[in-house]
Amino acid sequence: MKKLSTVLCVVMAAFITCAFAAEAPLIQRHGNAWPKSEKGYVTKYQCQACHGDYQKLGDMTKNLNPNPHRSHMGEVNCEECHKPNQSQPTLMCNSCHQFTIKK
């Protein structure tokens, strides 16, 4: 179990480093860690297995205004904003609103 925790920490550290670089598409940054799905799309549960639940994600993005992980829409599927072939998220919120994320 300890070995698995160490591996997960290394994977998360690599992900965070890549996330700030944000030049490569999401699917490319994840590499072999990209979740496999027979449905043709990734579910929020697959994302949460590595990145944590919406409570944790909301805490991690608490300095963003508005906080995209604390929405009146609830816990939407991650791919609504995080497109596999894009390097930056697209706010699903902006289909109704006109938000610009401010740090």
Image: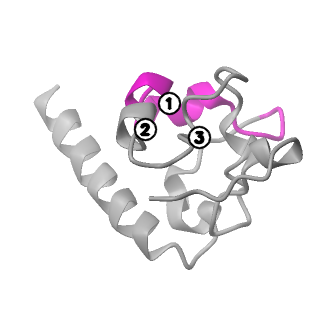
Tell me the magenta residue range: 38-56
Residue depicted at 55% across the width and 29% down the height = 70
Comparing 45 with 4, the one in front is 45
User: Which quadrant of the rendered structure holds the N terminus?
Assistant: top left
Closest to the observer: 9 or 58? 58
How many numbered markers are drawn? 3
Q: Residues within 10 Å of mark 3 (few under 14, many from 20)?
A: some
Q: Are marks 2 and 1 in contact (CB under 8 Å)?
A: yes
Q: Position of residue 50 (x, y in %)?
A: 42, 37
N-term-proximal mark, 1 vs 3: 1
Report if residue 52 lies within the magenta region.
yes
Residue 62 placement, left or right of 4: right
Q: Is residue 46 left or right of residue 39?
A: left
Q: Secondary structure at mark 3?
A: loop
Helix, strand or loop at label 2? It is helix
Residue located 88% across and 46% down the image: 95
Q: Is residue 90 above or below residue 88?
A: above
What is the number of the mark on residue 68?
3
Read off the residue under disc 2.
51
Residue 27, quarter of picture? bottom right
Pointer 1 residue: 48
- Of 55 and 93, the residue lying toward us: 93
Three-letter amino acid code of the residue under disc 2: His
- Quarter of the rendering occupied by the C terminus: bottom left
- Give the alpha-carbon distance from disc 3 to disc 2, as whole Å: 15 Å
Residue 72, percent from left and from top:
68, 22
Please tell me how crowded label 2 is: few (under 14), some (14-19), or many (20+) other residues with Cα within 10 Å. Answer: some
